[in-house]
């Protein structure tokens, strides 16, 4: 991936130079007027009493690969829908490619590509026919459509299958075709909402190879949501979202560096006794996380022998890892993303239904 020079920002993630005032960007102005591809201020969305997105301030630089990381139900997809003009914000401002998402909706739509979380291809049409239909919708010049279709299909490795019906494609092939469709009209910003959800690990890796390649060749801004920790590592910067709010923002290396401590996980027979013994012996808080006892310490490799020598409980197995994005999520939210995912969406739906019933 190319190394990028990002615009100068202050501690609040704002440009040091003056941003345009709300409504100042007109229909005839574009992304060249600002260094941000995406910019939000106090952006919020409420459904009755439920606040899905809570006053987020965000700036994504042109040419950046930016990731929204968080469990399902955190507000990631709602944010993308507001930025893509599919959902109107309840409050706040948002600009995409230099255009206000509520005042310049048509201009925003002309300058973005969007790959939805759910498939939206016409399965009874061929890959080429799907792209031609998209070109018609965007009013692309007929003189460039054929060459552009070939270019994007070759980019995602589907040119040889251009005449095949989409119904014959695998899940990974369909996702690649949707990415090609999102790129067809040469957008300034490509939104990918959970681009690899439901795919096997090998296909996910393949999809990311195509995404990284297109980022190099197309030189566009990529704004993606994911709940996969390993995928967030591909991004220049990520925002960790939890319960509708951004709780952390920075590059993966910066966020992991801020955690600092190593993570030690232990498989034991007596969980509660082990947790109490660690607290009594070392004065360290231990927790049960996803079936294993977990602690965070400086220089984990040096600390492991002390656990075997000084604890009065047997340890079946032990492992040490450097801080990960899961540790970052845990440090900011008090839970791992998998634990949040197992509880969050169900709780959100129950609360939403209860609020609707009270209206």
Image (spheres, grey):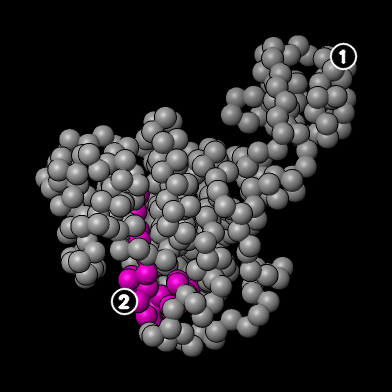
| Quadrant of the image containing the C terminus | bottom left
Residue 272 image offset from top left, x and y in percent: 71, 23
Residue 277 image offset from top left, x and y in percent: 81, 23
Going by the picture, which residue comes out furthest to the left?
124
Q: Name the one closer to the observer, 289 or 280.
A: 289
Q: Of callouts 2 and 1, which one flags the residue occurring earlier in the amino acid sequence?
A: 2
Image-based side of 182 in relation to 219, left or right: left
Residue 206 image offset from top left, x and y in percent: 41, 36
Secondary structure, mark 2, is: helix
**Magenta part of the chain:** 94-118
Q: Name the one closer to the observer, 160 or 99.
A: 160
Secondary structure, mark 1, is: helix
Residue at which label 1 appears: 309
Residue 106 shows which numbered tag? 2
Is residue 296 shown above or below 333? above
Name which residue lies at 63% across and 69% down. Answer: 7
Magenta segment includes 219: no
Name which residue lies at 59% across and 29% down. Answer: 290
Residue 223, can we see it? yes
Neighbor class of circle 2 (other Cα within 10 Å; few <14, some 14-19, many 20+) is some
Residue 248 image offset from top left, x and y in percent: 64, 55
Alpha carbon separation for disc pair 2 and 1: 67 Å
Residue 56, can we see it? no
Name which residue lies at 85% across and 24% down. Answer: 302
């Amino acid at each position: 991936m190319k190394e990028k020079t990002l615009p100068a920002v202050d501690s609040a993630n704002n440009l040091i130079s003056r941003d345009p005032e709300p409504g100042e960007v007109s229909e005839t102005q574009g992304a060249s007027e600002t260094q941000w591809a995406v910019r939000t201020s106090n952006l919020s969305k409420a459904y009755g009493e439920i606040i899905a997105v809570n006053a987020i301030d965000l700036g994504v630089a042109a040419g950046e690969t930016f990731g929204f990381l968080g469990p399902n139900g955190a507000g990631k997809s709602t944010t993308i829908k507001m930025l893509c003009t599919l959902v109107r914000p309840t409050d706040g401002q948002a600009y995409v490619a230099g255009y206000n998402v509520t005042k310049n909706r048509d201009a925003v739509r002309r300058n973005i590509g969007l790959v939805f979380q759910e498939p939206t291809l016409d399965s009874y049409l061929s890959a080429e026919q799907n792209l031609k239909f998209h070109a018609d919708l965007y009013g692309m010049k007929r003189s460039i459509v054929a060459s552009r279709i070939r270019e994007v299909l070759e980019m995602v490795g589907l040119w040889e299958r251009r005449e095949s019906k989409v119904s014959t494609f695998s899940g990974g092939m369909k996702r690649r075709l949707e990415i090609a469709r999102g790129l067809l009209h040469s957008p300034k910003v490509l939104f990918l909402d959970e681009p690899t959800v439901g795919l096997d690990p090998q296909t996910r890796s393949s999809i990311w190879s195509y995404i990284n390649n297109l980022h190099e060749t197309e030189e566009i801004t990529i704004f993606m949501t994911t709940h996969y920790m390993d995928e967030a590592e591909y991004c220049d910067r990520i925002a960790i979202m939890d319960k509708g709010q951004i709780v952390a923002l920075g590059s993966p290396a910066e966020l992991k560096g801020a955690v600092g401590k190593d993570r030690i996980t232990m498989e034991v027979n007596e969980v509660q006794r082990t947790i109490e013994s660690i607290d009594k012996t070392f004065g360290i808080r231990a927790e049960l996380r996803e079936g294993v006892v977990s602690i965070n310490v400086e220089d984990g490799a040096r600390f492991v022998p002390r656990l075997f020598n000084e604890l009065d409980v047997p340890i079946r197995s032990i492992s040490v890892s450097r801080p990960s994005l899961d540790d970052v999520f845990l440090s900011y939210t008090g839970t791992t993303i998998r634990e949040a995912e197992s509880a969050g969406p169900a709780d959100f739906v129950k609360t939403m239904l209860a609020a609707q019933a009270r209206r």
